[in-house]
Amino acid sequence: VLKWDCEAWQAVYSDLPSKQSKVSVPDPRRVTTIWDETRALTPEGMQDKIDACIAKIGPSASARAFVRPSGTEPIVRIYAEASTAEQVEDLTKDIRDVLIEMLP
């Protein structure tokens, strides 16, 4: 067990630019995820396309992203994070395009 105080923990954490967005879809229930909602299970192939969007940003960007269906609205939410605000915008746009393509 690490015996770190709050300052030590804060020293190893760096906040990255992030964005939450949403896409209107006819039926958000078509998107299913694993238990912690960080990876899409359906539609088949969608997670591979999201992973490709993340890879396109590049390994040095510390990028990550995931989507989850809303339980109350006809939308799918996008969560994206990367090293720069520009990378976050590009990642969000690319994932939005994937959702529009796969959830017509």
Image: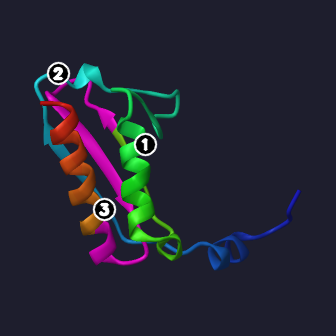
Marks 2/3 in contact by CB < 8 Å: the verdict is no
Q: Residues within 10 Å of mark 2 (few under 14, many from 20)?
A: some
Horizontal side of residue 44 vs 78, given as left or right: right
Question: In the image, what residue type sits under mark 3?
Answer: Leu
Q: Residues within 10 Å of mark 3 (few under 14, many from 20)?
A: many
- Assign a secondary structure to mark 3: helix
Mark toward the start of the polypeptide (2 vs 3): 2
Question: Relative to 65, does residue 15 appear above or below in the rendering?
Answer: below
Question: Relative to 38, does residue 72 appear above or below in the rendering?
Answer: above
Q: CA distance from mark 2 to mark 1?
A: 20 Å
Select label 3 or label 1 by which is in front: 1
Magenta stretch, residue numbers: 68-88
Question: In the image, what residue type sits under mark 2?
Answer: Asp
Circle on res. 91: 3
Q: Which residue is mark 2?
A: 27
Residue 91 lies, in percent from the top left, at: 30, 62
Residue 38 lies, in percent from the top left, at: 47, 40
Question: In the image, what residue type sits under mark 1?
Answer: Asp
